[in-house]
Image: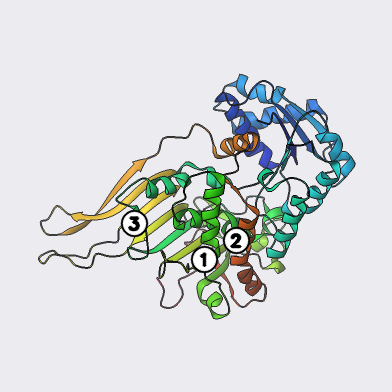
Amino acid sequence: MIDRLVIFGATGDLTARYLLPGLAALRHAGQLGDEFRLTGAGRDDWGTDEFRQWATGRLGHHAAELPAPVRQGVVSSSDYRQADVTDPAAVAAVVAGDGPVAAYLALPPAVFPAAVSALHEAKLPPGSRIVLEKPFGEDLASAVKLNRLLADVVPEQAVFRVDHFLAMTTVQNVLGTRLANRMLEPVWNSAHIAEVDIVWDESLALEGRAGYYDGAGALKDMLQNHLLQLLCLVAMEPPVSLGERDLRDRKLDVLRSVRPLTGADIVRRTRRARYTAGRIGDHDVPAYSAEAGVDPGRGTETFAEVELELDNWRWPGTVFRLRTGKALARDRKEVAVHFRPVPHLPLGHSGEPGPNVLRFGLDPEDLSLDLTGIGAHTHTLSPLTLTARIDPPELPAYGRLLRDVLDGNAALSIRGDEAEEAWRVLTPVLAAWSEDLVPLEEYPAGSDGPRPRDGAG
């Protein structure tokens, strides 16, 4: 286990909201020893005392449920170095020391190539690891280039392209539910499943993230990484084991089987939109184009939807719909598996059976199954929902990811060829959208999103 973590970009929102609380959760669970050391590096002209004071405040806000001595233990293990992550000499001074280090790039993706090049020149200690957040690259070409840069620094097994969705309890239950239950795996195919909705709709608007979001948009921010990873877990063949090679090989198979979207398919199977002024709950929301820091001329989308099909033995004819949107009327974060209707009903029943839908709730985390049963009136079909609550996990998603990084378990990180295949799937969509082949629709903040197309819904 590596006992030294260096966070480049340590004074940013990612560190405050997720990495520091994740480390505190690990310490609280007894999975972070007293020998652990954290080094924060950033452009801010701070010393260790300033960083510790800042970290204490952030942990008090984002990890208040953990005991104060636990939070203080993380703070006491930390120090701070001012450093430009693109300067090899400055980077070398930060990572210098005895033993391997885990270098976490909590940075904008555009900085990754320069940061990785600086790490290469700085010569990381043997056995070190590099951690990168999504999105990995801006398109297929940039992902390929970044993979080549990383290969010059550390072996592929030491590269952690993290996606915290993969560490969520319910996401892992997608695999557990379908693979460990005899009644589900035999019907987990296109003969029984008509479509799968993978949705991350949120009522939150931009919330001050224009600096990142306006350069990315909904497709790069959510679909290209998080939602495609969920698609892989839903559609993959059963792996021999849940080890890193077997699991990632099967995910790669799914991505390689995605039918390419070209020409008219992109116009018919994809949608993009952005929110206009509206009202969510009890507060007014300005139009996205009027948000501070937004360049209206970019045409950045806040809503994206893509329908995909897989060309393989298990899934011919099943539609996988990936959708995400901001500033919507309600939060809807789930994987919904829609089964085909029964072929026949006994005579004498009134009403139509509703669809059987297995729902994996992502936030909050739960599991439910929509069925059809007999209602209070004899021979009348009525909907019935079974719901299961999921116990809170011992560790938050970032706590588990950080543990895997320090332990060297790459099963829940994304392999280089997997990252490239994900871009292969969606790069044609990005190209078509950049040429305005798919119109940029609008929807009022606080609505259900863009209006259904003619003949849809």
Three-letter amino acid code at the position of disc 2: Ala
Three-letter amino acid code at the position of disc 3: Val
Q: Which residue sits at x=58%, y=79%?
A: 263
Q: Position of residue 363 (x, y in %)?
A: 47, 46
SS type, badge 2: helix
Pointer 1: what residue?
Answer: 257
- The quadrant in which the N terminus is found is top right
Q: Which residue sits at x=85%, y=41%?
A: 122
Q: How is the image coloured?
A: rainbow
Dot 1, crowdedness within 10 Å: few (<14), some or many (≥20)? some
Q: Which residue sits at x=36%, y=60%?
A: 338
Q: Position of residue 9 (x, y in %)?
A: 75, 41
- Could you tell me how far apart the alpha carbons at marks 1 and 3 are, in whole angstroms? 25 Å
Three-letter amino acid code at the position of disc 1: Ser
Which residue is more in the foreground, 350 or 309?
309
Pointer 3: what residue?
Answer: 357
Viewer-nearest of labels 1 and 3?
A: 1
SS type, badge 1: helix
- The quadrant in which the C terminus is found is bottom left
Q: Position of residue 242 (x, y in %)?
A: 49, 44
Task: Indicate whether 99 appears above or below 229.
Answer: above
Find residue 422 and name its label.
2
Question: Which of disc 1 and disc 2 is earlier in sequence?
Answer: 1
Question: Which of disc 3 and disc 1 is earlier in sequence?
Answer: 1
Which residue is more in the foreground, 205 or 419?
419
Viewer-nearest of labels 2 and 1?
A: 1
Find residue 372 and name its label.
none
